[in-house]
Image (tube, helix red, strand yellow):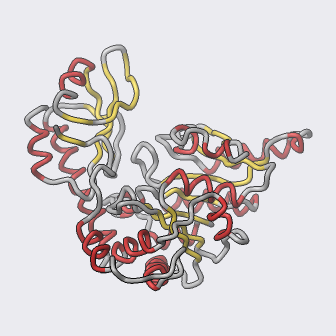
């Protein structure tokens, strides 16, 4: 069976496992007070060009989104997100369970547009009864989006400007950030993200780590007592070394970017493979997520040999499906896939 259903099927990149084994018998203090945590944080600060940045290591994406959003919003505020956004669709109501409404707006190919956000906020404050309503308190985006699309630098600048205009934070979900940064079509760097966003996270779970996400407040603007809030939410690892050693390794010798570039190269080959076989694409994704249109009969046939994710129906006889490459995808995987197309 071939597996292309997501980008976190494998355990971890071998270099991370090697480093975890090497450091296994070190006796280290807990809760992120060890020297590996300090080193990992410093390497991230250097990579983003923000020496004053505050960095926290959490375990997974939903946990991260819930804690960041809840800690930065007042009780009467909600978070603006695209209708297709991860917090809107695939987090089991985690944000709403924290007491904050997800305020969904239509997007284009998974992306929020600055004018859409601006018009929504202006309409909100022009309503005489707005004090009876959920305030827009943050803008949430993901890069790449759920559709594998990317924001351009100008789009991020426009969204950042809207957030500055209304004095609310811009939060970027970077679960697959490495794959976005290494796309051949992007003009966005990690330093651009640090400059334009108030908070973002660097995804490890989907980019080579066993687990872990690095939350970054680039301007040293973390909520008061965030460490305690993380603890209160049951998200503070006693063995903080687990995530720290992994991020220390990922940000040594550009490993994070190198393995992300590999996934993009594999995605380009996968795209060529489908195109040469005459398949149509649901949309044009420049990242490791590729969306293919299959006849439903072909979909059922392929599922006997290949794992991929059903996305959405296109018409009565066709469906859009998602194939993901990752840091672990090989040429042999693609060659085997070709035999089933």
Q: Position of residue 268 (x, y in %)?
A: 22, 51
State the residue at coordinates (85%, 43%): 126
The answer to whether 177 appears left or right of 87 in the picture is left
Q: Position of residue 37 (x, y in %)?
A: 47, 79
Viewer-proximal residue among 97 and 203: 97
Viewer-proximal residue among 337 and 167: 337
Image quadrant containing the C terminus: top left
Specify the quadrant of the image occupied by residue 217: bottom right
Q: Can you name the residue that lies furthest to the right here?
A: 128
Q: Position of residue 3 (x, y in %)?
A: 23, 42
State the residue at coordinates (45%, 70%): 190
Q: Can you name the residue that lies furthest to the top here?
A: 316
Viewer-proximal residue among 95 and 102: 95
Q: Position of residue 187 (x, y in %)?
A: 41, 64
Viewer-proximal residue among 82 and 206: 206
Q: How many marks?
A: 0
Q: Please, is residue 76 above or below residue 275 in the view?
A: below
State the residue at coordinates (70%, 60%): 72
Q: Please, is residue 157 above or below residue 95 in the view?
A: below
State the residue at coordinates (62%, 59%): 68
Specify the quadrant of the image occupied by residue 316: top left
Image quadrant containing the N terminus: top left
Q: Please, is residue 26 above or below residue 172 in the view?
A: below
């Amino acid at each position: 069976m071939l597996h292309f259903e997501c980008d976190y099927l494998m355990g971890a990149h071998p270099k991370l496992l090697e480093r975890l084994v090497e450091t296994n018998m070190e006796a280290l203090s807990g809760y992120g007070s060890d020297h590996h945590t300090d080193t990992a944080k410093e390497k991230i600060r250097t990579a983003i060009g923000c020496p004053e940045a505050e960095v926290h290591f959490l375990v997974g994406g939903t946990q991260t989104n819930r804690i960041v959003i809840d800690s930065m919003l007042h009780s009467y505020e909600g978070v603006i997100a695209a209708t297709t956004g991860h917090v809107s669709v695939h987090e089991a109501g985690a944000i709403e369970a924290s007491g904050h409404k997800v305020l969904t707006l239509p997007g284009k190919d998974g992306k929020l547009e600055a004018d859409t956000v601006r018009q929504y906020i202006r309409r909100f404050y022009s309503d005489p009864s707005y004090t009876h309503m959920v305030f827009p308190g943050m803008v949430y985006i993901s890069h790449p989006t759920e559709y594998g699309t990317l924001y351009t630098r100008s789009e991020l600048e426009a969204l950042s400007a809207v957030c500055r205009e209304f004095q609310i934070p811009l939060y970027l979900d970077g679960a697959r950030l490495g794959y976005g940064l290494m796309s051949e079509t992007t003009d966005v760097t990690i330093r651009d993200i640090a400059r334009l966003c108030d908070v973002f996270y660097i995804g490890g779970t989907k980019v080579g780590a066993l687990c872990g996400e690095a939350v970054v407040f680039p301007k040293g603007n973390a909520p008061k007592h965030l460490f305690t809030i993380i603890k209160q939410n049951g998200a503070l690892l006693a063995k903080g070394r687990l995530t720290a050693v992994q991020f220390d390794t990922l940000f040594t010798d550009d490993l994070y970017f190198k393995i992300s570039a590999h996934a993009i190269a594999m995605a380009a080959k996968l795209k060529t493979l489908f195109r040469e076989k005459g398949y149509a694409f649901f949309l044009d994704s420049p990242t490791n997520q590729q969306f293919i249109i299959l006849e439903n009969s072909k979909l059922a046939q392929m599922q006997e040999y290949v794992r991929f994710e059903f996305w959405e129906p296109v018409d009565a006889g066709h469906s859009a499906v998602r194939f993901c490459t990752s840091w672990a995808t090989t040429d042999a995987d693609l060659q085997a896939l070709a035999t089933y197309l």
